[in-house]
Amino acid sequence: MSKTVKVKICGLTNEEDVKTCICHGADIIGFVVGYPRLPWNLAMQEAKKLAANVLCPAETCVVAGGPRDKIIKLATEIKPGYIQLHGGESLGDTAFLAEKLKKIGVKIIKAVFPNTPDLKKAAADFCKAGVYALLFDPRTPENAAAGGIADTDMFVTLKNAVNCPVIIAGGINPENAADIIQKTKAQIIDLMTGVEKAPGVKDEKKVKLLFEKIGREQKSDRQ
């Protein structure tokens, strides 16, 4: 089971950490763009340069929010595999972006939060709007630095209520990842601070331990 789960590691800020995460098995590498108050924030050109170091089979994701034009510009310029909408984007804007970016091969991940009004209905509506996946995250952009703990029970409820993948995030680290995967049967897990030694700086020992704990060997062809 744990050998099939995808691992998304977010908040990458430098080339060395990108290579480390890919080497040890990360499936999706995430870059935060447009949140200047956060320690993981990158300018668009910085994210573009780092994304160029991510080679298949690993994929890239840009975490962003804001007006449609801004998101389209980021997607067109950086050409990530995914854009993760992590703000208060409306259903209409999300549907528009999902359709627009699909034409250039970029998929939408839409974040939803415990305080999202009518969470189950909102999640189902976003799936119907054409997003690739939802991300259930206790961290909003405003409290990302403070972290949060994944609500595994609510995650399972959401996962069973929608027909698109749901990514679980929040407080996941090498010590609890396997248990969370076992409890939730999540298809994708998302980590950021759980594999860091300082905000924006990944810890190779933690990254390596994560993949050992979830039963995935280092992939020597990922360099």
Image (cartoon, helix red, strand yellow):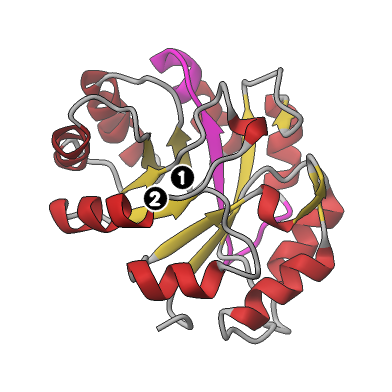
User: Does 174 appear in magenta?
Assistant: no
Visible residue check, residue 223 = no
Query: Quadrant of residue 120 in the image?
Result: top left
Question: Between residues 195 and 44, which one lies in front from this camera angle?
Answer: 195
Q: Which amino acid does label 1 sit on?
A: Tyr
* Residue 18 x %, y %: 75, 55
* Residue 102 x %, y %: 32, 40
Residue matched to label 1: 82
Q: Residue at x 46, y 45 (%)?
A: 82
The magenta segment is 53-72
Looking at the rendered structure, the secondary structure element under dot 1 is strand
Task: Give the quarter of the figure containing the C terminus.
Answer: bottom right
Q: What residue type is labelled 2?
A: Asp
On screen, residue 213 versus residue 40, left or right, reads: left
Query: Quadrant of residue 130 in the image?
Result: top left
* Marks 1/2: CA–CA distance: 24 Å
Residue matched to label 2: 151
On screen, residue 78 versus residue 207, left or right, reads: left
Q: Residue at x 57, y 57 (%)?
A: 172
Of labels 1 and 2, earlier in sequence is: 1
